[in-house]
Amino acid sequence: MDRPDSEFVFELAVCQWAERDWQPTHEGDAVLVARQLGTKRRRWDSIVLECDTTGLRRRAAFGPDAFDTDHLHVLRNAPAAWTYYRDALPDPGYPWRYVRESIHELADRDALETRKRGNRIEIRRKAPYPDWVNRIVAIENKPDLDASAARNLVPQLERDVALGLADEVWVATAATGDDVEPVLLTDMPAEAGVLTVDTDAGTAERVWQPRTLSPDEPGTRILERPDDGASGARFEYVDAEWKREKRLAIAERGYERGWRAYASTMRPDCRHFRLDRAQSGVFPYCDAKTCRPTQGECRGSCPAFEPEPPAWRSKGWPVEGGPGAAIKRLLDDRRRRQRPALPGER
Ligand code: SF4
């Protein structure tokens, strides 16, 4: 008998629903879904990127891997004609030697042209780095939103709303079928939207619409909000430029990882691992435990782990490397399909 879905499985169901059915705000925008991304201080469960379709295709020319904020500083300011890099780029606010490192890394990735003139490094862009992200939507997944889970979640959502790094913040919880969904009786911030998700059917209903936040404006970071009723909260101002850089870096990581990267931390090379297709999507399944395992338990240290028998790899298995490697390739192919025009499409 299967146990109830874990948060991990719920999260995969939400990601797959969003990939199928998310309606972007701007008609015609493409949708990319990722999971477990954010900043050093805050990691969101699921992320929906609403992308300009032309920009997304142009982004693909830079390859499937993410660029970090230092790379983006160079790429976004790289000139069309050969220029000494210090003349071309705005002062980064950190030592120039780090900029030089980024330049060399970008050249190694074929994302930027470089040449030496005397002892000066000149740079030239290969293509303009496009504006490809229109909106970022953060979803917090809480399948079982009881009163204590709600109490823990509310301060996080209040921080998200105050910072305004995403365009929208949502809570996704399992649909109960009650006349009034219990989540609506909690003290969620009114700015956060609420989705109730039927993980068997693979559907979700928007039972509370979020307010659009202001990612282009400065935000407020809540550092401390004591609940003793006597002390004041501590805040920190966050400028719009920081938010713009962070948003793009998050989008870049979402572009690289998507939501299917779980295969790289689980053990698809275990003989009990397989992908199970349900109405709501495709999920990892463990035949030894007869359940959908979590990322935490499906590891080499799992007591039931058994490596694929070597014979599976040599007895004419249709794809090189055995079933585990084939599962990784399959998930990778599916991810690439959501990212049109990547070089070297298989
Ligand atoms: S036995 Fe353990 S390692 Fe193997 S698939 Fe199941 S959970 Fe994963």
Image: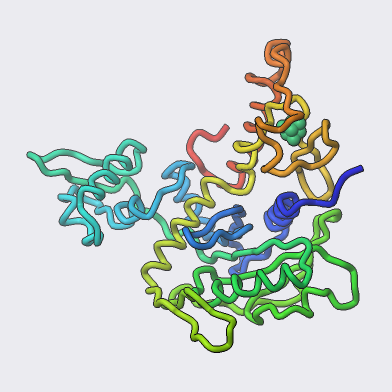
In this rendering, the answer to whether 108 lies above or below 5 is above
Residue 204 in percent (x, y) is at: 78, 63
In this rendering, the answer to whether 243 lies above or below 325 is below
Residue 332 in view of the camera: no
Which quarter of the image is occupied by the C terminus? top right
Q: Quarter containing ligand 1?
A: top right
Question: Looking at the image, which residue is at 15% across and 56% down?
Answer: 87
Question: Looking at the image, which residue is at 78% across and 78% down?
Answer: 184
Left or right of 296: which side holds 117? left
Q: Which residue is more in the foreground, 232 or 13?
A: 232
Residue 121 in view of the camera: yes
Question: Looking at the image, which residue is at 38% across and 67% down?
Answer: 242
Left or right of 39: which side holds 273? right
Here the colouring is rainbow
Residue 247 in percent (x, y) is at: 46, 62
Q: Which residue is more in the foreground, 287 or 20?
A: 287
Q: Which residue is more in the foreground, 312 or 302?
A: 302
Which residue occupies the extreme left position in the image?
118
Question: Looking at the image, which residue is at 47% across and 74% down?
Answer: 223
In this rendering, the answer to whether 131 lies above or below 212 is above
Which picture quadrant has residue 23? bottom right
Residue 186 in percent (x, y) is at: 75, 78
Which picture quadrant has residue 308? top right
In this rendering, the answer to whether 11 lies above or below 276 is below
Instruction: Give the number of marks.
Output: 0
Q: Which residue is more in the foreground, 5 or 19?
A: 5
Which quarter of the image is occupied by the N terminus? top right
